[in-house]
Image (cartoon, grey):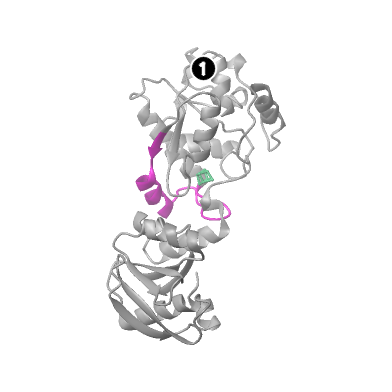
Amino acid sequence: MLIVKFMKDLGYDVIPVFFQTPFFGPENARKVVEQIGMKLIVEDITEEHLIMLKHPRYGFGKNLNPCIDCHGLMFRRAGELLEKYQADFIISGEVVGQRPMSQRRDAINSVGKLSQVKDLLIRPLSQKLLTDTLPIREGWVRKEEMLDIQGRSRSRQRAMAEDYGITWYQNPGGGCLLTDVSYSRRLKDLMDNEMMTLEFVRFLKTGRHFRISEDVKLIVGRNNEDNEELSRLTKDNLVLKTVVVPGPLGIVNSKRELAIEELTLAASILLRYHNKVTGEGDVCYGPNFHLDSTVQVEKATDKELEKYRI
Ligand code: SF4
């Protein structure tokens, strides 16, 4: 947000682009870009991001965040858009030394290498401290107008925001869902069981997750909001519901039909989250809300929950 405004004020035309995946969405970016009177272009990079996530060349941060490869991928995609938008170069708000993984000086170089458009990158907040790239060598960008911010303190950036009258911005220290411990654990489970496809990744944000077997997962809504979200996400999934309503909703993630033992286990876990049922109860199930079969099960025990919970 700062560098968009900064470069615009210096007289450059700027086109803000957001790269979207299931791990980060454009809502906040849209809000901030609208604040400075511009329109955001959103590009979906899910497919490539999921492929990269399996083997990031520069590895992961503290959790499943492959920040260097992720930045590299975004810049590469930005490079591919230059012709479409008749743009000459790419700017980003990276600051040398600001983040432990992706913005160390050597990491900034690695990002540049991965992007395949290294020579077209300008980081206005730190560019005075970085190697000159084509836009500076050619005189498209005046180096003396660029800044020399570095390090983890964000005081100069905050002062700039204040000067620009920007009143709302995201917590600058936060990352995407891949930096979250429990989300990363669920994603790792998908990776380990070779289920990391968009179809299953879409469900990771919602509900309680259980691994029933190598290629079968159950997701149980924790409340009404979860149940509604799970219903929205469901396409051809097997759905489980307690016969006594209201009660939790269960969605199965799998590419195949379930064996009876797997179905019974999933139903007993679902029933465990029904407050009004004690001991035994009925669970109906079927593909995509065609709940025309029923199975009677015992509620799962705490030990079982612990064993299967991801
Ligand atoms: S925090 Fe998430 S979105 Fe940001 S660079 Fe890292 S992996 Fe990519």
Q: Quadrant of residue 116?
A: top left
Report whether 55 appears left or right of 184.
Answer: left
Quarter that holds the N terminus: top right
Instruction: Residue at 36% x, 20% y: name it.
Output: 86
Q: Is residue 109 visible?
A: no
Q: Is residue 50 above or below residue 204?
A: above
Residue at the image point whose x is 43% and y is 38% from the top = 19
Seen from the viewer's position, the closer of residues 179 and 269 is 269
Question: Is-magenta flag for residue 58?
Answer: yes
- Above or below, 6 relative to 47: above
In the rendering, at what x and y percent does residue 301 appear?
52, 84
For the magenta stretch, what is the residue range?
A: 42-66
Above or below, 128 against 253 in this view is above
Q: Say what amino acid the circle numbered 1 marks.
A: Ile
Q: Position of residue 11 (x, y in %)?
A: 52, 13
Q: Is residue 238 magenta?
A: no
Say above or below: 71 vs 126. below
Q: Nearer the viewer, residue 228 or 303?
A: 228
The residue under the point 61% across, 27% down is 126
Q: Quadrant of residue 232?
A: bottom left
Q: Quick one: label 1, few (<14), some, or many (20+) residues within 10 Å? A: some
Q: The residue tagged with tag 1: helix, strand or loop?
A: helix
Q: Is residue 7 left or right of residue 229?
A: right
Q: Position of residue 59 (x, y in %)?
A: 50, 51
Any part of residue 308 in sight: yes
Nearer-the-camera pick, 6 or 38? 38
Q: Which residue is mark 1?
A: 136
Counting the numbered discs, the total is 1
| Quarter of image, res 123 | top right
Residue placed farthest to the front in the image? 245
Q: Position of residue 182 (x, y in %)?
A: 55, 61
